[in-house]
Image (cartoon, grey):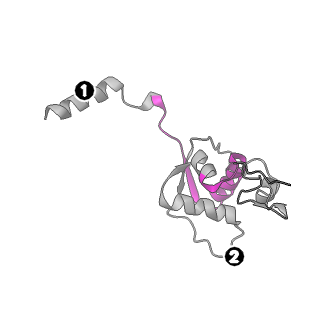
Amino acid sequence: MTEHRTDGPWEPGSQWYDGEAGPLVRPYAMTGGRTQPGPTGVRFDLIALVTLDPTAPALDDGTALGPEHRTLIELCRTETQSVAELAADADLPVGVVRVLLGDLLELGCVVIGRPVPPAQLPDERILREVIEGLRAL
């Protein structure tokens, strides 16, 4: 029997698949069966920006965080990332990342921000005039 490799995280050949045991961790196991982020009511859009909260409480080994939570914290430690980037970098489904981020938000570990809406960005004409003015210097 030939084993084929695919790019999916739960398929043979990925880090979440053991040739003898099959899938090591199912998504529902990582989230405790939850499919929605906690009761905070925050929407985790794909472009929502996640930053590690500098005032976050220190997490010791006694904290009930799973390895996936800790992976997300480590990914946010170096720079602000979007939900989509975190899912890709952690090699986790977006739905799982949203639930885990809800946990981290409730613990005060992360801050969720929104990118600036296009309506609030400066007009392109003004930006071009500024660039032309700088070039004239």
Instruction: Name the residue at 60% across, 47% down.
Output: 83
Task: Give the structural element (helix, strand or loop) at label 1.
Answer: helix
Q: Which residues are magenta?
A: 89-118
User: Residue at the location (31% across, 23% down)?
Assistant: 125
- Residue 61 lies in magenta, yes or no? no
Rendering coords of residue 47 (x, y %): 56, 41
Measuring 47% from the left and 37% from the top, which residue is drawn there? 116
Furthest toward the top, the residue is 125
Amino acid type indicated by mark 1:
Glu
Q: Residue furthest left?
A: 137
Q: Which residue is mark 1?
A: 129
Q: Is residue 54 left or right of residue 26?
A: left
Residue marked by disc 2: 62
Outermost residue to the bottom: 61
Report whether residue 53 is seen. no
Q: Residues within 10 Å of mark 1 (few under 14, many from 20)?
A: few
Q: Earlier in the sequence, mark 2 or mark 1?
A: 2
Residue 15, given in percent of the width and then of the height, sits at 70, 60
Residue positioned most to the front: 1
User: On screen, 67 above or below 111?
Assistant: below
The relative height of residue 108 versus residue 7 in the rendered view (above or below) is: below
Quadrant location of the C terminus in the rendered image = top left
Residue type, label 2:
Gly
Q: Nearer the viewer, residue 125 or 58?
A: 125
Give percent across and percent down for residue 120: 43, 31
Classify mark 2: helix, strand or loop. loop
Q: Position of residue 124 (x, y in %)?
A: 35, 26
Do we see residue 21 in this rendering? Answer: yes
Quarter of the image containing the N terminus?
A: bottom right
Please indicate whether residue 21 sits to the left or right of residue 137 in the image.
right
In the foreground, 66 or 59: 66
